[in-house]
Image (spheres, rainbow, N blue to C red):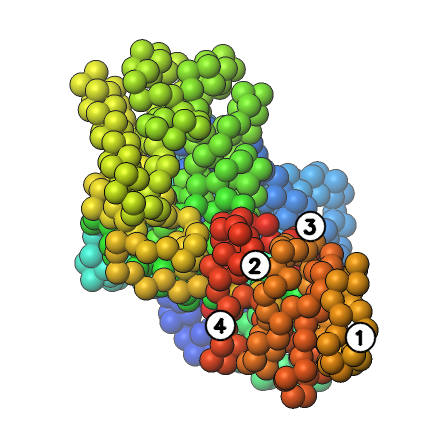
């Protein structure tokens, strides 16, 4: 299960529930109703946040990625430290540290509980993650779950079932010691692990329960949760009310339901909900203070519902404002469309992915090739967009490209297609990449590092570039004996799958046969093959019938062919990328006047020229000088030599051209279109080279 469903949307709901828990919205209208809302229903918020953490952390815990886990805990610790200082003034104002033992209280607050009641969550989360990460690696997921369940049961008798504990003096003494040590962060031991584990089990689980059944089970378990809470309240058994028996199944089915309800991943909502959780007590104080100053206590303090509404509104507004200011400061750069830029049509990208999946066999998945900055399209943004469509396998050429993806939140499998030296193996392990092994010696070098990593074996079936020769069976078998390398796939690459020439088709079929024979031999030796894939873009278009686990879609994913080629399949791909620039100025050139470097162009008659703000440093080939651009839906021929930063065009036949007009070098303008295939052929190259060489200083605009 890789989709995030509506988790991010529910984060916001959970943040409002936390505010409700601390403002008692229904208290003015009835204690029972408010108890149900704040002491039972709102109790889903914190477990939900914990389950989200468990859901996304599991992969790194399972793979023993200590660096990532420590990095996660470090981020939480920094957030905790900032929150402590945020609330110190409030505690000092309230006289919290005026007692004789104020030093002890301060240390206890900083280490265990935070300087305000809700901040226990951060040290509790760190403690819980450390416990779970250690146990999962030592005893596995199932046993860790049972231990977490036992810890939760122990915690219950210090929380909602404390009335039972009071009847047993030995147990009461035990819990009194726990409460003395930590008012709230004990939850890091007794509460946090179970909900982290629920998130992990859901991530790990393959069993799909229909949404309607999940919702039904949630309604039943949630109803029983409310009943449990009311009974405990009626019998006055609760010391606290954050832990219930039925909270565990209710959260399990709620989380599964949210994953199945369509939603969009939103970093903004994640940030806003976190800020709301942190700052809402300050907003409560400010709302109360403002109500007192303006004599509005009857409205915004005494009326609990209006008080909740005011606190919620201003908390959300403050969090939203903070994200806007932060984003503005972070992105204090010139507008992307100020000079020269690339426009990316994400809808076309999604449609191309659907078209390619449509022509492949049902069980063959698409692996998105996002090397070379996703062929100039922006690797991180493209990978994130494809992740939302259900594609969770990516291929890159280099270790640096893989790190960029992972560092920007790409969670899927990332296969490094090219060579990576053995001294970088710890980086491969840290980020949980899959490394291509290009031959026996490469495998031995990696294995000698004694660092366990996932690999895929490249088979050379006739391209004679990277890979172990398909006939080198002894070498292949020896790679399997490298005990530190876990083989997750065996793949090859087709040399002329783009050609429909009979000789090239025969060569491609021989490559496919050699690959299949190698796979059959490995299976006959009882050696695990893992994922199989041989098709790249043209392999998909010209040999779509091949039954392998994956097909690697590169240039075709972006709606482009390498050249204006014929292919066997009837697939309508839409260009994803356009290149545009601004007109800097318009000049008159008189008869006989020369233009540009080398005086390479001479005006045959009086004409108008326009300077376009893009050049070969932006990736425009210098030999595109015989081409044209589109301005105001008309063709403007390129004249003179293309410069590093600019090029010049003839706009004599186009009325009204002026500074700041848009020139299109690749893409559509009205009824006119310039394709990447047209440009690359005119320059004597292929689209792969043209697009992958686009310059870093181009701005990027993504159209949803």
Gap in angstroms between the C-alphas marked 2 and 4: 41 Å
Most foreground residue, 487 or 34: 487
Most foreground residue, 447 or 210: 447
Counting every numbered tag in the picture gives 4
Q: Mark 2 Cα within 10 Å, few/some/many (few <14, many 20+)?
A: some
- Residue 601 appears in the figure: yes
For marks 3 and 2 on the same chain, the one whose residue lies earlier in the sequence: 3
Name the residue carrying label 1. 592
- Considering only vertical position in the picture, is 364 above or below 443? below
Q: Mark 3 Cα within 10 Å, few/some/many (few <14, many 20+)?
A: few
For marks 1 and 4 on the same chain, the one whose residue lies earlier in the sequence: 1
The residue sitting at 37% across, 16% down in the picture is: 479
For marks 4 and 3 on the same chain, the one whose residue lies earlier in the sequence: 3
The residue sitting at 31% across, 37% down in the picture is: 534
Q: Find numbered disc 3 in the image and state the secondary structure of the residue it sits on.
A: helix
The residue sitting at 32% across, 28% down in the picture is: 461
Discs 1/2, front: 1
Q: Position of residue 399 (x, y in %)?
A: 54, 34
Disc 1 to disc 3: CB gap under 8 Å: no
Name the residue carrying label 2. 271
Gap in angstroms between the C-alphas marked 1 and 2: 62 Å
Q: Find numbered disc 1 in the image and state the secondary structure of the residue it sits on.
A: loop
Numbered badge on residue 673: 4
For marks 1 and 3 on the same chain, the one whose residue lies earlier in the sequence: 3
Most foreground residue, 555 or 338: 555
Gap in angstroms between the C-alphas marked 1 and 4: 32 Å
Gap in angstroms between the C-alphas marked 4 and 3: 53 Å
Name the residue carrying label 3. 82
Gap in angstroms between the C-alphas marked 3 and 2: 15 Å
């Amino acid at each position: 299960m890789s989709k995030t469903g509506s988790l991010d949307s529910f984060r916001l709901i959970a943040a409002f529930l936390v505010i409700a828990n601390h403002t008692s919205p229904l208290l003015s209208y009835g204690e029972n109703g408010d108890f149900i809302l704040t002491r039972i229903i709102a109790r889903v918020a914190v477990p939900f946040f914990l389950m989200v953490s468990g859901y996304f952390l599991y992969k790194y815990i399972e793979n023993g990625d200590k660096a990532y886990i420590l990095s996660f805990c470090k981020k939480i610790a920094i957030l905790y430290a900032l929150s402590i200082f945020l609330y110190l003034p409030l505690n000092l104002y309230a006289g919290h540290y005026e007692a004789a033992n104020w030093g002890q209280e301060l240390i206890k607050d900083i280490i265990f509980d935070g300087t305000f009641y809700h901040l226990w969550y951060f040290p509790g989360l760190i403690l819980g993650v450390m416990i779970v990460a250690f146990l999962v690696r030592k005893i596995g997921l199932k046993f860790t779950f049972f231990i977490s369940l036992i810890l939760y049961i122990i915690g219950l008798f210090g929380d909602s079932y404390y009335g039972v504990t009071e009847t047993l003096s030995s147990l009461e003494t035990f819990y009194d010691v726990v409460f003395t040590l930590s008012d709230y962060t004990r939850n890091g031991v007794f509460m946090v692990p179970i909900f982290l584990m629920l998130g992990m089990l859901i991530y790990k689980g393959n069993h799909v329960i229909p949404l309607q059944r999940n919702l039904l089970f949630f309604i039943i378990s949630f109803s029983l949760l409310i009943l449990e809470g009311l009974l405990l309240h009626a019998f006055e058994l609760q010391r606290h009310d954050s832990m219930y028996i039925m909270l565990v199944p209710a959260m399990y089915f709620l989380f599964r339901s949210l994953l199945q309800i369509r939603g969009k991943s939103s970093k903004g909502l994640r940030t806003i909900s976190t800020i709301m959780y942190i700052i809402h007590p300050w907003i409560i104080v400010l709302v109360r203070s403002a109500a007192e100053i303006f004599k509005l206590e009857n409205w915004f303090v005494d009326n609990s519902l209006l008080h909740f509404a005011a606190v919620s509104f201003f908390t959300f507004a403050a969090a939203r404002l903070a994200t806007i200011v932060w984003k503005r400061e972070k992105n204090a750069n010139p507008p992307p469309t100020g000079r020269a830029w690339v426009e990316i049509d994400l809808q076309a990208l999604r449609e191309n992915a659907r078209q390619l999946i449509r022509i492949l066999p049902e069980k063959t998945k698409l692996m998105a090739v996002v090397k070379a900055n996703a062929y100039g399209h922006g690797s991180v943004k493209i990978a994130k967009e494809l992740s939302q469509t259900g594609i969770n396998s990516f291929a890159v050429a280099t270790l640096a490209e893989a790190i960029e993806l992972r560092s920007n939140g790409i969670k899927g499998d990332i296969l490094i297609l090219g060579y990576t030296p053995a001294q970088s193996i710890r980086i491969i392990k840290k980020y949980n990449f899959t490394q291509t092994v290009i031959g026996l010696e490469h495998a031995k070098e990696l294995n000698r590092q004694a660092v366990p990593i996932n690999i895929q074996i490249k088979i050379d079936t006739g391209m004679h570039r990277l890979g172990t020769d398909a006939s080198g069976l002894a070498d292949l078998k020896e790679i399997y004996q490298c005990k530190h390398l876990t083989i997750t796939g065996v793949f090859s690459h087709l040399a002329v799958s783009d050609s429909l020439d009979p000789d090239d088709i025969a060569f491609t079929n021989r490559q496919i046969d050699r690959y299949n024979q190698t796979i059959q031999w490995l299976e006959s030796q009882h050696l695990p093959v893992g994922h199989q894939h041989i098709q790249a873009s043209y392999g998909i278009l010209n040999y779509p019938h091949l039954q392998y686990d994956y097909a690697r879609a590169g240039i075709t994913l972006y709606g482009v062919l390498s050249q204006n080629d014929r292919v066997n399949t009837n697939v309508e791909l839409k260009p994803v990328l356009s290149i545009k620039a601004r007109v800097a100025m318009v000049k008159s050139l008189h008869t006989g006047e020369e233009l540009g470097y080398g005086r390479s162009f001479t005006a045959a008659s009086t004409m108008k020229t326009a300077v376009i703000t893009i050049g070969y440093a932006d990736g425009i080939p210098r030999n595109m000088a015989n081409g044209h651009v589109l301005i105001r839906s008309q063709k403007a021929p390129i004249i003179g030599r293309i410069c590093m930063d600019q090029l010049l065009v003839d706009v004599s036949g186009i009325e009204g051209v002026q500074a700041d007009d848009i020139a299109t070098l690749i893409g559509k303008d009205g009824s006119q279109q310039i394709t990447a295939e047209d440009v690359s052929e005119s320059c004597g190259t292929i689209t792969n080279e043209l697009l992958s060489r686009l310059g870093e200083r181009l701005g990027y605009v993504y159209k949803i």
